[in-house]
Image (cartoon, rainbow, N blue to C red):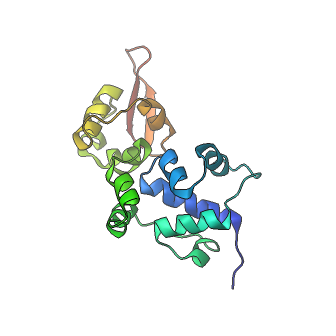
Amino acid sequence: MKAYNARITTQNIQNHFKNSGLTIEVFANILGVSKRWLEYIFSGNENYEFTPNTVQKACEFFITDFRKFTTELQTVPEDLREILRKKHMGNVEYNKVLSDPPSVPFIIDNILVKDNEFILSNGLELKFIKKIIWRYYPGLKLTNLSSDLQKSVSIEYWLHPTKKNTNLYRVK
């Protein structure tokens, strides 16, 4: 039997979190921890690690086996958010957060990069990207969209050749 591995556990939780589409605030609430504490763990701060109780809450939410989740890297299903929505349909709290629009980083990496208009472009300004996202999630607040696009591993960006302080974005 393999022993508990804090690094693998953190990586599994982080990978599942990323594919869940939840914001860090919502996920911290589900785990019963502070947003800041969770950010410290995800940043690799070695002074912080998940407690067994917190790991158990994550396993219950992600519907995974505690022993496997804490000893070996798990493959995250591409449609994890949809799986979670179906599994937690009877849980009012989880159903609510999974029915809300997903996080902007999730939208970028799972929806925007698969949108034909975005894929076929040679680079779009932020205002056009917002219009694409609003087709999927009308009225969604996109206050940090530029920053989220620049952090995404799926997006490349560069300065607009003629407009100052304007970037163009496209799929890598």
The residue at 66%/51% (across/down) is 41
Image-based side of 5 in relation to 87, left or right: right
- The image shows residue 127, relative to residue 135, as above or below, that is above
Image-based side of 34 in relation to 24, left or right: right
The residue at 53%/69% (across/down) is 59
Q: Residue furthest front?
A: 92
In the rendering, at what x and y percent does residue 45 appear?
72, 49
Q: From the image, which quarter does the N terminus lie in?
A: bottom right
- The image shows residue 125, relative to residue 149, as above or below, that is above
In the rendering, at what x and y percent does residue 110 appear?
37, 51
The residue at 63%/43% (across/down) is 36
The residue at 58%/72% (across/down) is 69
Question: Is any atom of residue 125 visible in this view?
Answer: no
In the rendering, at what x and y percent does residue 90 appear?
33, 67
Q: From the image, which quarter does the C terminus lie in?
A: top left
- The image shows residue 8, relative to residue 41, as above or below, that is below
Image-based side of 43 in relation to 102, left or right: right
- Looking at the image, how many numbered discs can be counted on the residues? 0
- The image shows residue 146, relative to residue 44, as above or below, that is above
Question: Is any atom of residue 45 visible in this view?
Answer: yes
Q: Residue furthest bottom?
A: 1
Image-based side of 17 in relation to 49, left or right: left
Quarter holding residue 20: bottom left
In this rendered view, identify the residue nearer to me: 85 or 5. Answer: 85
In the rendering, at what x and y percent does residue 89 appear?
32, 65
Q: Residue furthest right?
A: 47
In this rendered view, identify the residue nearer to me: 145 or 99. Answer: 99
